[in-house]
Image: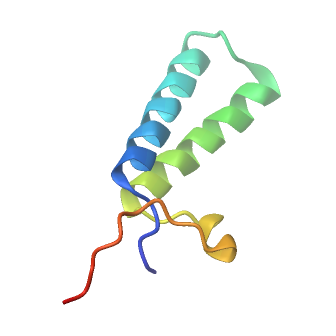
Amino acid sequence: MKKNMGSADRIIRIIVAVIVGILYYTGTVSGTLGIVLLVLAGVFVLTSFISFCPLYAPFGLSTCSVKEKK
């Protein structure tokens, strides 16, 4: 698995996941929508920790900085 997420992408995903978690636990977002958003937040955290987004791979996207080979 080649890393395809840069640090900015990872930080944004973690911030979004924290916000969704706060909204869910304060009761602002509830029901089915709340559960779906909570699962999505979990996926965001997981993909941030492993620096790989499976949706980026088929499209050839990468937010990771490219290092030049010497």
Please report the residue visible at 69 percent of the width from the left and 16 percent of the height from the top.
29
Question: Which residue is at the far right?
Answer: 32
Q: Position of residue 45 (x, y in %)?
A: 46, 47
Q: Position of residue 36 (x, y in %)?
A: 73, 37
* 33 left or right of 42 in image: right
Q: Position of residue 65 (x, y in %)?
A: 35, 64
Residue 70: image quadrant is bottom left
Question: Which residue is at the far bottom?
Answer: 70
Q: Position of residue 19 (x, y in %)?
A: 51, 23
Please report the residue visible at 57 percent of the width from the left and 50 percent of the height from the top.
43
Please report the residue visible at 49 percent of the width from the left and 41 percent of the height from the top.
13
Residue 59: image quadrant is bottom right
Question: Which residue is at the far left?
Answer: 70
Using the image as rendered, state which of residue 54 and residue 45 is in the foreground: 54
Residue 8 against residue 52 in the figure, above or below = above
Using the image as rendered, state which of residue 41 and residue 2 is in the foreground: 2
Using the image as rendered, state which of residue 17 and residue 66 is in the foreground: 66
Residue 19 against residue 42 in the figure, above or below = above
* 33 left or right of 27 in image: right
